[in-house]
Amino acid sequence: MSASLPVTIDDIEVAARRISGRVLTTPLVASAALSQLCGVPVGLKLEHHQTTGSFKLRGATNAVLSLSAGDRALGVIAASTGNHGRALAHAAKVEGSVATICMSHLVPVNKVSEIRRLGAHVRIVGRSQDEAQEEVERLVAEQGLVMVPPFDHPAIVAGQGTLGLEIVAQMPDVAVVLVPVSGGGLAAGVAAAVKTRRPATRVIGLTMERGAAMMASLAAGKPVHVEERPSLADSLGGGIGLDNRVTFRMCRELLDDVVLVTEAEIAAGMRHAYAEEREVVEGAGAVAIAALLSGKIKDIEGPIAVILSGRNIDMDLHLSVMNGETDPFPEEAV
């Protein structure tokens, strides 16, 4: 792994010490059903049990704590598909700051409500993460708020990387790590930690077919714009930013592969999580299970760690999927 990458193992270890006591060390538990299916041990990293219901609290907490007291007093702001906003609202409130979260109309109502409940200012703008980001930049210029991006920031990536440190500590012989990928903050941080501790371990990104911005960018060799479309994995929506400075480069160098899953496969992953593992996960949190169930992870030769990244799903939607719905957002309705 290149020592010149924007985030290193040293940054991740500093982040781990900084956020200790403010985020949970989440369990990694064996899945009997998936282990039998794959023929190797499969462990579920229960990151959806994190305080705010997703891994995002790690990066948000590290980023807020990295700011000066003066910057925290100004207030922080970010665009979000929901989980980063919730995490940043929580982290800011704990440290005596106030967050402003800009989101598109595609963000589920339950996620918006939770962010408001945490005391953040909420602005709903447009129908894409890119449009929400434009509002962030306008408010930064007009009000002097401090931007804390959802993924493309060294402190965010380092915070998410602490999850990778935990995986290696909890499953020392891990051969494959399956990680959801959207803007790449989680994938970049986890891969940096895992590849440093266990260079032979494969780190594979998972995302939905609809609007797979990081995969399209990797294929193009540069960040590209991808249309954002409704998906069960709504947390994986949005672009990676055409001026991406951190996560594109890290994902390009560190990820061994990126695998796409369909809406029906995501729904099957959510149902498996509930029926077999007794876990409620949102669509983005189920993409790795979806890939295993559909046989899309090839050449498995050792223990697998599966990251269940979030649980913040509207429960009516969850019930619908549990009752057999395979695609609440069919293409003709998009």
Image (spheres, helix red, strand yellow):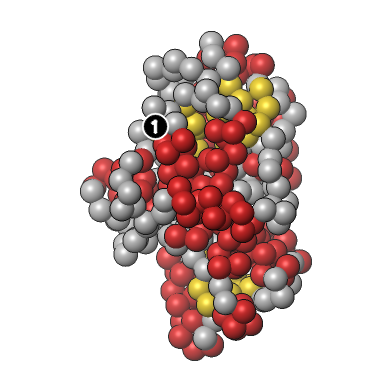
Vertical position of residue 162 compared to residue 97: above or below = above
Q: Quadrant for residue 6, please give it.
A: bottom left
Figure label count: 1
**Circle 1: residue type:** Pro
Q: Quadrant of residue 201?
A: top left
Q: Nearer the viewer, residue 164 or 291?
A: 164
Can residue 18 be seen at all in this image of the molecule?
yes
The quadrant of the image that shows the N terminus is top left
Is 311 drawn above or below residue 144 in the view shown? above
User: Residue beneath label 1, please?
Assistant: 199
261 or 206, which lies in front? 206
Give the camera-side residue of 332 and 254. Answer: 254
Q: Is residue 298 above or below residue 283?
A: above
The location of residue 47, given as percent across then percent down, is 64, 41
At 58% from the left edge and 27% from the top edge, which residue is drawn?
171
Residue 240 percent across, percent down from the top left:
39, 56
In the figure, is residue 3 to the left or right of 120? left
Kindly identify the residue that appears in the image at 66 percent across and 22 percent down.
30
x and y percent of residue 236 in the render? 50, 48
Instruction: Name the residue located 69 percent from the left edge and 35 percent from the top edge.
Output: 27
Q: Position of residue 49 (x, y in %)?
A: 71, 43
Secondary structure type for disc 1? loop
Which residue sits furthest left? 221
Foreground residue among 172 and 285: 172
Mark 1, Cα crowd under 10 Å, few <14 / some 14-19 / many 20+, is some
Residue occupying image coordinates x 31% and y 53%: 4
Residue 312 in view of the camera: no
